[in-house]
């Protein structure tokens, strides 16, 4: 597979480590009453679609960026690649508003 | 039988004769021959035995699709079993042997199977060999295993080396027949980066095997001229002897280049083959087509081969499989063989055309609407029986029979991403469908079977791809060549009494397929698996479609309704060694050496693998005969005076930034918010699921600067985790991370005299006294007259100890200086074993304890998990199942009888309990002999262990037939109050 | 004068530089430089880039690139992070030198000891490296700087001259393995 | 019809006219007591044991394609019960015991071959972990044997003892482990289930699960609605897809695991060998092919195919430990979609929808588990309580913190 790195262009997926569902970015608030349950759902119940999937990949043998890769799990086609730090910042700023 | 079937002409080099041997007999061929063509030229038709019935076989094909002519090539540790004689390029001194036969190719004992074919019908083994139960492994299976298999491995390590390589291009052209050459020319002339890959050792594909002319030149000459033109282009790379073996995601292709297989010996250090990974923006697949046979009774005799293969032998290799040849066809292409044979003066015994309306041929015995219904000649064809249109049969003498059932486009690579070809009625063949992204198919592979159409579609397809990529295709005149239509009337098999083979190698007959149908194995997948159709080394390249057609007829459905089998990589079999490349033996993975490696080697150290690192395990001294002597000495010397150990392998992560404190506090479960500058603290890192991930010490070098250490094994995973936390969880924090594991050479200096030793190394302006630099202090210092260094007062051994770090290139010098400076204290270098002993004596945990299923509670560190802050893992560590009353707790163990030993991996049982899973109380994680205590000691996890100090339990180890009574004690065997390390 | 003098050794463990000529390529161990990493502190991007430009003599290069002046050269290593290189003779303490100029704006980390460097030159550099590395070696332009993998070893590859000269930086602990891989590939294509 | 040597000879003499289809091809009934979704090894075994051992009737197995076309036909055929943890070892040992009598039980030769499995270890830490594991096996009544390097050298002389990057320090053997002809397992169970009256309905894809008042009523399929009192879901690899029909998220991801076979070779490898310093396991089939595999590709996938890096990684490991295979040719590679659970262990449990039962999350362990999985799932379906060896395979173990994590890799499916 080839991942179109937003900064570095096409790179062999072999340089990357895949973590899985990008919803791991959305870590729950530890102070909520049902924090244990929220963390359970956050950590264990991840998206696993047959189709488009947003997932985290780490450029371990490259620039150490975490990327959010939108990939079709049936065809392996990659539709979008973003820097995870940008995605996370956007998510955090939305949280705050 | 003739001994010389060599003809005039051809593309072999008659000036270069080549000697070779087959089954010990010597022969001569020419450069440019394959093993099969040279053997045929020498009148040898019998080259192999089939898998199940051990039927005598000769080549069916002249290419990689060969099912029959498999040999063991080369000898000794270079033996290559199952090598297709039809693709082996002849070289001087080549040695080949037949296989799957005993005692000889001609007299094969297991050919007895052929006398009872009915017993060995499809799937017979699923229905018997079940009684008595014990007989399967003892009797039946060994017999079957010995009879099965084909060639044999040498059993010796492969002596050759293999390379891997990586190529990038705009356009990859697969196959160099007319379509491929046209495509490559278009790409080359447009200035694109083109790779042309050809499996054969010359370019041209069928142009080399046919007698057509192209632009008034013989086809092979035209191919040669294009080769010359392409070779002159800097932007084109031609890879001959290179099979593209797989189409992977996003335009990544695997290709195997054979560099030295055509040579008697390779130069040392030169690879035999290269496995290329080709990154192609676009791919034009011009893989051609493969002819398929017609099944008829006894259609497997040596001398019966594909009609097009005979043309390859005649036109390219200047050899005929026999002096008298018959042709059996259902299409016009089969008739071309007649013309070509006649042109070379080979006698045509007869032409049998299944069609009643096929073209007529002059001056040849020609049967229309006829079929071959039987053959004779056990070791080589002698005679065929023809059933004529009027139902009468006649026998015809012949030494070879060319069979053509039509051509199947080579769709293999189009299926590698699970594309499913579709049936085309007019060609009676499957055409590519659902091809991988970026791939386009041209020429015969796409069902364009005439040479002119191959040129046209090759050029056009390449042109489209080039335009997509932004290149301007130059167009240009297409070469002129034959443009004959395909006239085919599907005909798959001849009904008859005898066995009609569909899959020749695996001995799958028409009857087997019908039996599979009768027993309900009707889907293509069931058919393949039940009968083994298409599962042999040729992957059914010549068999699958016929098999499908037979099944279709049995089910009364059309072929497309019956299904299609798709092909998986690799397109042709690839040596496992080639996939491994250089990564074998000592080069399997890189070696990481510590800064003191060279010095340790000089000391005669014994090294041990710690992940990729090599670390000194102990330093034997003269007179020491057992490792324990060395380790005990190192431990005692360190605890008595001072020892030195290279601890560079621990991961070191530099953490800086305005929010570094917040960050460190959030990734460790224990509190770090108030760690003063110039202080070190032990940190416990949890995974988000609450299990311990790693531990280590983290030093605060400045307000906004920390250095975290990790265990050796987890340096990479922890760094990845921290980057995840930084980028994905807390992107608003000002934190910068970088690994400095390699940048600093770090040594533990441990023992009561460590301070005295370091006073001689650390520059005087730094006060090493206990008051000025107490336990858990850290500082940036200079050593040996100004070299910057880092000093940490931390202790893994439990002694007064320091770790000192200098830039890595000074590590070698530092260890030498430490040893020199330590002479007055009898300083001792110690290895990982002594390190391990001392940490067990002190009750520190390592990877043996931190096995990924252990919580802070299990370690007795539950109070470290701060509930007052958000840190990774704290929330889920509160789950009920991780906090129940009799949770495992870390304890120390010592033998009740001090002379007794025990082993890590033992399980704890209460005294008096039966040793069983139900009574399991926990397990031993680490064990060593403590030279200080004079007996074995261990660490382990025991249910409710903290409340069981003083209890005697049994450490049972049935695996090693050991059982020892052990007393549960505190895990801190030595200096439990920590007075030494604070001294 | 201290009692103990510390002399550095080369990454390959020798005191002299290893220099091998195989076929048309020459592989030379380079121990002449000091290295440090610099990473921008959040919110200091503007101030940092002008200070860095003043100090280094060039604007810090973008992703996948390198730049150099008489004294310094630098290559991009990660978003907002660079490796800066200078002669060890003049800049043995490169991290401190950079820190003095860039403190508060950037996190500076000593990296000299962390890396080994091999300079590869010759007509067949591309053929040699395409046996080792999945980057597009034939398409690599002068000034390109990329992190990738050679035989399971994480490396930086800097293109000094297109198709002619490449420097490979690898983890110092793996210098022997990296050197072995380079030599083996050079022999393969020699 | 009973299969036997006598029958084979009789049929051979009479032109094989008497063989009947191994299983019927019935049309679906309007309603069943039990509908098992998934005609793979586990689904067929479940139906077989439901009928044979638990005396249940009116059972159907629905298969979207052809039976045995999923992971039971796409694995590396290894059976073993060498597990470390309490939650797993008794279950896999139960499975191994069922394998030992399976062929006589369902009258089909699946070529259960207890040729032994050897796990190699390369460090002292691995040795300690294997000793712990071997003891767990013995304490659970399974067999285990500790092998010294010398013993290994005499048993497997072709291993890389002299020039290995990670030297072989010993091995843990389970002599009762081995291999089975994988396709035959599906066929044997199918034939056995069919003979006990189970309807095996192929080309019948479930498109929806109907519910009423919190309980299931049946399934919509490509062949119409089929009513059911109880539904058992046994579609590992596609568990997420199926359970999405009832809006249930699972602690499971789908990943692709590649497997490989070489060209046929004369016997060269007597048993199953696994490498401890890389991702590699290998055996030789009765037909002569070296069957081997390694790690999953590491990304979520339903594609039944993988990519080159893992192929290379597996072959590198193979060459590291067994350099004699260098000249054997890799013939075919394929991929299976695995249910990778969050702790590496399976789930056999009720769901919170009345009448809907789940079996999945098998990770790498699915094939060897087939008999016990079928038995335990049948037990749960028929009696509404877990079998004694499968009590830990519950959904709520993650919520409660009772993970069964053999590798200690945590909630990271691609590391199990």
Image: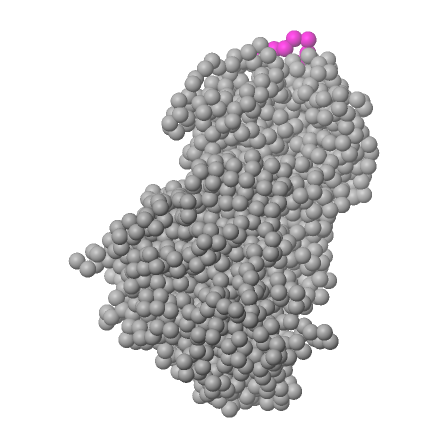
Q: Say how the picture is coloured.
A: one colour
- Look at the image and give the residue range highlighted in magenta: B359-367
Left or right, residue B461 beside residue D117: left
Number of marks in picture: 0
Q: Nearer the viewer, residue B309 or B127?
A: B309
What residue occupies the far bottom of the structure in this picture? B950
Q: Residue at x 39, y 22 (%)?
A: B472
Name of the residue lying farthest toward the top: B362
Q: Residue at x 46, y 65 (%)?
A: B788
Going 36% across and 78% down the picture, which residue do you hit?
Answer: B864
Residue B68 visible, this angle: no
Does the magenta run of residues contain D125? no
Q: Quadrant of the N terminus of chain B?
A: top right
Q: Nearer the viewer, residue D55 or B710?
A: B710
Q: Nearer the viewer, residue D221 or D300?
A: D300
Q: Is residue B469 visible?
A: yes
Q: Is residue B108 left or right of residue B124?
A: right
Residue B365 lies in the magenta stretch: yes
Give left or right: position of D194 versus B700.
right
Q: In the rendering, at what x and y percent does residue B785 appear?
A: 50, 68
Position above or below: B345 against B524: above
| Residue that lies at the very extreme toward the right in this rendered image | B25
């Amino acid at each position: 597979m080839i991942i179109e790195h937003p900064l570095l262009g096409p790179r062999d997926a072999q340089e990357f480590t895949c973590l899985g569902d990008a919803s791991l970015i959305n870590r729950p608030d530890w102070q909520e009453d049902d924090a244990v349950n929220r963390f359970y759902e956050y950590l264990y119940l991840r998206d696993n679609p047959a189709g488009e999937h947003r997932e985290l990949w780490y450029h371990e043998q490259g620039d150490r960026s975490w990327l959010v890769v939108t990939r079709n799990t049936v065809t392996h086609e990659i539709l979008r690649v973003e820097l995870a730090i940008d995605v996370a910042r956007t998510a955090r700023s939305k949280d705050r508003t | 039988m003739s001994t010389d079937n060599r003809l005039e002409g051809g593309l072999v080099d008659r000036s270069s004769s080549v000697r070779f041997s087959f089954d010990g007999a010597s022969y001569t061929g020419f450069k440019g021959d394959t093993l099969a063509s040279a053997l045929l030229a020498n009148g040898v038709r019998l080259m192999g035995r089939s898998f199940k019935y051990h039927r005598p076989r000769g080549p069916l094909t002249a290419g990689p699709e060969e099912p029959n002519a498999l040999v063991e090539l080369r000898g000794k540790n270079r033996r290559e079993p199952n090598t297709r004689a039809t693709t082996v390029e002849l070289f001087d001194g080549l040695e080949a042997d037949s296989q799957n036969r005993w005692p000889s190719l001609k007299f094969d004992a297991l050919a007895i199977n052929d006398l009872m074919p009915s017993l060995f019908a499809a799937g017979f083994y699923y229905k018997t060999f079940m009684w008595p139960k014990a007989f399967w492994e003892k009797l039946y299976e060994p017999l079957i295993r010995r009879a099965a298999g084909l060639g044999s491995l040498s059993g010796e390590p492969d002596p050759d080396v293999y390379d891997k390589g990586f190529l990038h291009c705009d356009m990859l052209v697969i196959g160099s027949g007319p379509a491929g050459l046209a495509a490559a020319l278009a790409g080359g002339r447009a200035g694109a980066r083109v790779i042309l890959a050809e499996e054969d050792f010359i370019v041209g594909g069928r142009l080399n095997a046919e007698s057509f002319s192209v632009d008034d030149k013989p086809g092979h000459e035209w191919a040669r001229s294009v080769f010359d033109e392409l070779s002159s282009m800097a932007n084109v790379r031609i890879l001959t002897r290179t099979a593209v073996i797989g189409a992977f995601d996003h335009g990544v292709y695997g290709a195997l280049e054979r560099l030295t297989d055509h040579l008697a010996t390779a130069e040392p250090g030169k690879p035999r083959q290269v496995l290329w990974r080709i990154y192609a923006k676009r791919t034009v697949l011009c893989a051609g087509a493969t002819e398929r046979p017609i099944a008829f009774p006894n259609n497997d005799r040596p001398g019966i081969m594909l009609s097009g293969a005979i043309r390859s032998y005649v036109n390219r290799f200047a050899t005929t499989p026999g002096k008298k040849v018959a042709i059996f066809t259902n299409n016009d292409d089969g008739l071309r063989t007649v013309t070509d044979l006649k042109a070379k003066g080979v006698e045509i015994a007869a032409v049998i055309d299944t069609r009643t309306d096929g073209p007529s041929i002059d001056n040849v015995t020609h049967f229309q609407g006829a079929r071959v219904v039987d053959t004779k000649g056990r070791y080589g064809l002698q005679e065929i029986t023809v059933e004529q249109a009027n139902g009468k049969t006649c026998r015809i003498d012949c030494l070879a029979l060319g069979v053509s059932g039509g051509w199947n486009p080579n769709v293999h690579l189009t299926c590698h991403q699970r594309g499913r070809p579709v049936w085309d009625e007019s060609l009676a063949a499957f055409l590519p469908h659902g091809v991988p992204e970026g791939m386009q198919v041209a020429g015969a592979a796409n069902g364009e079977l005439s040479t002119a159409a191959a040129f046209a579609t090759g050029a056009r397809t390449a042109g489209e791809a080039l335009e997509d990529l932004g290149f301007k295709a130059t167009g240009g005149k297409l070469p002129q060549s034959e443009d004959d239509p395909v006239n085919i009337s599907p005909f798959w098999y001849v009904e008859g009494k005898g066995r009609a083979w569909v899959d020749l190698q695996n001995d799958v007959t028409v009857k087997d397929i019908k039996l599979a149908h009768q027993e309900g194995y009707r889907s293509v997948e069931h058919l393949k698996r039940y009968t083994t159709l298409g599962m042999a080394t040729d992957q059914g390249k010549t068999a699958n479609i016929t098999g499908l057609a037979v099944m279709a007829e049995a089910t009364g459905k059309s072929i497309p309704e019956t299904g299609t089998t798709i092909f998986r990589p690799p397109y042709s079999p690839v040596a496992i060694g080639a996939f491994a490349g250089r990564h074998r033996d000592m080069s399997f993975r890189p070696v990481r050496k510590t800064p003191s490696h060279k010095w340790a080697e000089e000391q005669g150290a014994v090294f041990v693998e710690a992940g990729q690192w090599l670390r000194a395990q102990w330093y034997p001294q003269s007179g020491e005969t057992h490792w324990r002597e060395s380790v005990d000495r190192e431990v005692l010397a360190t605890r008595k005076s001072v020892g030195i150990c290279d601890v560079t392998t621990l991961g070191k992560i530099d953490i800086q930034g305005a929010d570094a404190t917040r960050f460190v506090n959030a990734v460790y479960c224990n509190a770090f918010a108030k760690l003063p500058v110039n202080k070190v603290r032990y940190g416990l890192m949890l995974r988000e699921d609450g299990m311990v991930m790693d531990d280590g010490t983290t030093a605060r070098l400045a307000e906004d600067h920390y250095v975290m250490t990790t265990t050796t094994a987890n340096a990479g995973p922890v760094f990845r985790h921290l980057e995840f936390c930084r980028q994905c969880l807390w992107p608003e924090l000002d934190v910068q991370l970088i690994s400095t594991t390699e940048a600093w050479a770090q040594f533990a200096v441990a023992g009561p005299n460590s301070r005295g030793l370091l006073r001689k190394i650390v520059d005087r302006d730094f006060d090493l006294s206990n008051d000025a630099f107490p336990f858990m202090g850290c500082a940036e210092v200079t050593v040996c007259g100004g070299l910057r260094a880092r000093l940490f007062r931390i202790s893994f051994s439990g002694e007064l100890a320091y770790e000192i770090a200098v830039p890595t290139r000074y590590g070698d010098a530092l260890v030498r200086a430490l040893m020199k400076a330590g002479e007055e204290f009898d300083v001792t270098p110690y290895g990982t074993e002594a390190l391990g002993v001392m940490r067990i004596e002190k009750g520190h945990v390592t990877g043996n304890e931190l096995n990924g299923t252990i919580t802070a509670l299990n370690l007795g560190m539950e109070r470290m998990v701060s509930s007052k802050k958000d840190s990774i893992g704290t929330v889920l560590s509160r789950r009920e199942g991780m906090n129940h009353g009799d949770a495992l707790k870390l304890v120390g163990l010592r033998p009740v009888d001090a002379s007794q030993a025990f082993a890590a991996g033992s399980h704890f049982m209460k005294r008096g309990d039966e040793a069983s899973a139900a009574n399991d109380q926990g397990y031993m994680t680490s064990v060593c002999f403590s030279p200080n205590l004079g007996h074995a000691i261990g660490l382990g996890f025991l249910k409710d262990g903290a409340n069981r100090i003083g209890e005697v339990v049994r450490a049972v180890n049935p695996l090693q037939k050991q059982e020892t009574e052990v007393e549960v004690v505190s895990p801190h065997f030595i200096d439990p109050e920590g007075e030494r390390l604070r001294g | 004068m201290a009692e103990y003098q510390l002399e550095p050794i080369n990454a390959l463990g020798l005191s002299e530089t290893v220099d091998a000529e195989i076929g048309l390529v020459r592989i030379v161990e380079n121990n002449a430089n000091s290295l440090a990493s610099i990473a921008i502190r959040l919110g200091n991007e503007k101030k940092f880039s002008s200070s860095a430009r003043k100090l280094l003599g060039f604007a810090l290069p973008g992703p996948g690139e390198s730049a150099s002046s008489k004294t310094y050269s630098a290559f991009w290593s990660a978003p907002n992070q660079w490796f800066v290189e200078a002669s060890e003779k003049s800049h043995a303490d490169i991290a401190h030198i950079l820190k003095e100029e860039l403190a508060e704006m950037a996190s500076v980390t000593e990296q000299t000891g962390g890396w080994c460097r091999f300079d590869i030159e010759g007509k067949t550099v591309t053929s040699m490296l395409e046996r080792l590395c999945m980057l597009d070696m034939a398409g690599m332009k002068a000034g390109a700087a990329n992190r990738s993998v050679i035989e399971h070893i994480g490396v930086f590859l800097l293109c000094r001259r297109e198709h002619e000269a490449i420097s490979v930086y690898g983890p110092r602990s793996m210098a022997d393995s990296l050197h072995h891989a380079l030599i083996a590939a050079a022999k393969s294509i020699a | 019809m009973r299969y036997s040597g006598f029958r084979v000879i009789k049929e051979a003499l009479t032109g094989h006219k008497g063989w009947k289809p191994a299983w019927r091809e019935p049309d679906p009934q309007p309603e069943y007591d039990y509908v098992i979704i998934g005609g793979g090894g586990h689904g067929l075994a479940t139906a077989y044991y439901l009928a044979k051992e638990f005396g249940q009737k009116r059972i159907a197995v629905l298969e979207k394609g052809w039976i045995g076309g999923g992971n039971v036909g796409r694995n590396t055929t290894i059976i073993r019960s060498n597990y470390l943890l309490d939650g797993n070892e008794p279950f896999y040992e139960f499975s191994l015991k069922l394998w030992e009598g399976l062929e006589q039980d369902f009258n089909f030769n699946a070529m259960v071959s207890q040729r032994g499995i050897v796990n190699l270890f390369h460090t002292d830490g691995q040795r300690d972990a294997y000793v712990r594991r071997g003891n767990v096996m013995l304490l659970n009544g399974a067999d285990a044997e500790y092998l010294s390097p010398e013993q290994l050298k005499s048993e497997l002389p072709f291993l890389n003892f002299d020039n290995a990057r990670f030297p072989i320090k010993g091995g843990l053997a389970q002599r009762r482990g081995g291999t089975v002809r994988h396709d035959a397992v599906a066929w044997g169970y199918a034939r056995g289930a069919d003979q006990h009256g189970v309807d095996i309905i192929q080309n019948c894809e479930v498109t929806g699960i109907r519910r009423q008042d919190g309980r299931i009523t049946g399934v919509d399929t490509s062949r119409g609605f089929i009513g059911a009192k109880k539904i058992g879901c046994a579609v590992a690899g596609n568990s997420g897809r199926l359970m999405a029909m009832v809006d249930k998220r699972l602690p499971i991801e789908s990943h692709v695991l590649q497997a490989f076979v070489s060209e046929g070779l004369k016997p060269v490898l007597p048993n199953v060998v696994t490498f401890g310093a890389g991702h590699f396991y290998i055996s030789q089939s009765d037909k002569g092919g070296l069957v081997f595999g390694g790690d999953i590709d590491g990304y979520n996938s339903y594609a039944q195919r993988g990519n080159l890096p893992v192929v290379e990684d597996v072959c590198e490991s193979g060459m590291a430990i067994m350099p004699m295979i260098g000249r054997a040719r890799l013939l075919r590679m394929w991929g299976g979609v695995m249910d990778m659970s969050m702790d590496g262990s399976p789930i056999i449990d009720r769901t919170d929808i009345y009448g809907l039962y789940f079996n999945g999350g098998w990770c790498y362990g699915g094939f060897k588990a087939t008999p016990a999985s079928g038995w335990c799932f049948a037990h749960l379906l028929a009696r509404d309580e877990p079998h004694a060896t499968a009590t830990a395979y519950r959904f709520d173990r993650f919520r409660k913190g009772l993970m069964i994590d053999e590798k200690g890799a945590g909630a990271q499916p691609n590391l199990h």
